[in-house]
Amino acid sequence: METKKEKLIIEYCEGGIYATDHGALKWFKQLKNDIIKNGVKNKHIKLSNEFMVELTRLLVTREIIKPNEIIYKYKDEFIRISQDGGLEKWPEGFCDNTDLLLGELVFGKNPDGKSRF
C-alpha cells in the first residue's frame, strides 16, 4: 500500500460484497454508525457494488472520517480522496458503469464508440 496512515481500505473488485440499493443504504448506515461509535479501525472491505463504494465517500464529506483515514483500491492502484469527496484519479473500470450507461443513453454511444452493456 502507498502509506500506512489509512485505516479503512475500500477495494472495488469482483467477488466483493454486493447489495441491492436498499441493502446498500442499510449497510452504509451500519458502517457509519459503527465508525461513529467505535472510530475508524484497520479494515479492508471488498465491494463489488459501485453504489456502495460511492456511499463511502460520504464518510469524508460528512466529516465522519478524515481523508487520510480511507483509501480506495482498484486492481493494483490506490486512490486518495479529498475533503470534498473528490478522487485524485479515476482508473478505467473503477466505478464507471453509471457514467458509461448515462453517456450511452444521452449520446447514443460512449466516447470509445463501444457499449459495455
Image (cartoon, grey):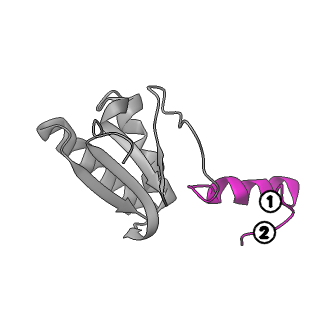
Q: Are marks 2 and 1 in contact (CB under 8 Å)?
A: yes
Per the image, label 1 sits on a secondary structure element best described as helix
The residues colored magenta run: 93-117
- Image depth: mark 2 or mark 1 in front: 2
The image quadrant where one finds the C terminus is bottom right
Q: Position of residue 84 (x, y in %)?
A: 48, 26
Q: Is residue 52 left or right of residue 39?
A: right
Res. 115 mark: 2
Residue found at x 73% / y 54%: 102
Above or below, 89 relative to 48: above
* Image quarter of residue 100: bottom right
Res. 18 mark: none
Q: Position of residue 63 (x, y in %)?
A: 33, 27
Residue found at x 43% / y 66%: 20
Q: Position of residue 34 (x, y in %)?
A: 18, 45
Q: Position of residue 115 (x, y in %)?
A: 78, 69
* Image quarter of residue 8: top left
Q: Is residue 64 left or right of residue 103?
A: left
Q: Nearer the viewer, residue 113 or 49?
A: 113
| Other residues around mark 1 within 10 Å, as few (<14) / some (14–19) / many (≥20) | some
Residue under label 1: 104
